[in-house]
Image (cartoon, helix red, strand yellow):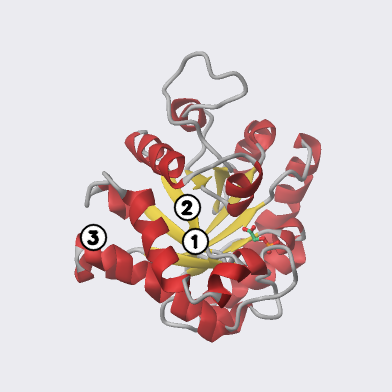
Amino acid sequence: MRRTVIAGNWKMNMTPAETKKFIGELAPMVAGLDKCDIVLCVPAIDIPAAVEAASGTNIRIGAENVHFKESGAYTGEISAKMLVEAGVEYVVIGHSERRQYFGETDKTVNLRTKAALAAGLKTIVCVGESLEERELGYTETLLKYQTKMALTGVTAEQLKNVVVAYEPVWAIGTGVTATAEQADEGNGFVRAAIAEAYGAEAAEEVTVQYGGSMNDGNAAELLSKVNVDGGLIGGASLKTDKFTAIVKAANA
Ligand code: PGA
């Protein structure tokens, strides 16, 4: 049975003080809801506050990016080793905002994924098509390509620490959610790509999340789909009540 993972992606929101307050409020609300992993991926500056506030709770802390080199002249970057030492367990890689605004490519997504896995982090690798790509009929081709590119050189053993998030770019932050059928189909394409690379049995074990305007109103339906093993949640992860409702939907 694959594990359901409900992960918040805070993006560039929350200060360290706000982080401490948020997790202090959230922890009792999600206590005991252990049928899924609960993760908050936070800005790097918030990591120490988040790790401290989440200590002793069932909330795990993730980062929003990681560099692929171990150390060196990469001003502004953060290595996997630094994240691990800070108490981070998960890292989001290849989010569409990184691809769109910060020059992230399938190649750098792959390098970051390998570096994170080598350091023992769990990765949340993001893939997803634009509206144009969907309308041209390239969704399956693109999702399979992005998934395989991201995982090139990742061993079958390392695959156990891989979560893939299917996030249609047109659904992120737009309020337009994919239908549960579209989410299930997209996640299915991701799983099929993993099956082509690692075999059907291994693919069955990989957690594939849906992301893109998931909220307290639509989570239950999205999560009811066989290929939707959790969510990567932006906007709704910034509100303790909404995020808790999604975690509850995953525990129902
Ligand atoms: P959203 O963001 O939930 O605000 O659409 C999802 C994401 O970017 O991971």
The picture quadrant where one finds residue 229 is: bottom left
- The residue nearer to you, when weighing 219 against 66, is 66
Does the rendering let one see residue 15?
Answer: yes
The first of marks 3 and 2 along the sequence is: 2
Q: Does the residue labelled 1 lie within 8 Å of ligand 1?
A: yes
Residue name at image x 64 percent, y 71 percent: 246
> Viewed as shown, does residue 76 lie left or right of 79?
right
- The residue nearer to you, when weighing 179 against 103, is 103
Residue 143 rendering spot, x and y as whole percentages: 43, 65
Q: Distance between the residues labelled 3 and 1?
A: 17 Å
Q: How far apart are marks 1 and 2 (CA)?
A: 6 Å
What is the quadrant of the C terminus in the image?
Answer: bottom right
Residue 50 rendering spot, x and y as whole percentages: 65, 40
Residue count near mark 2 (Cα–Cα under 10 Å), binned few <14, some 14–19, many ≥20: many
Task: Tell me the element at label 2.
Answer: strand
The first of marks 3 and 1 along the sequence is: 1
Task: Tell me the element at label 1.
Answer: strand
Q: Mark 3 points at which residue?
A: 197
The circle on residue 200 is none
Q: Name the residue under label 1.
A: 165
Q: Is residue 100 above or below residue 82?
A: below
The kind of residue on which mark 3 rests is: Ala
Residue name at image x 36 percent, y 51 percent: 149
The circle on residue 124 is 2
Asked if the residue under mark 2 is in contact with the one under mark 1, i.e. CB atoms within 8 Å, the reply is yes
The kind of residue on which mark 2 rests is: Ile
Tag in front: 3 or 2: 3
The kind of residue on which mark 1 rests is: Ala
Q: In this view, does 118 lie above or below 199?
A: above
Asked if the residue under mark 1 is in contact with the one under mark 3, i.e. CB atoms within 8 Å, the reply is no
Residue name at image x 23 percent, y 66 percent: 196
> Viewed as shown, does residue 53 lie left or right of 209?
right
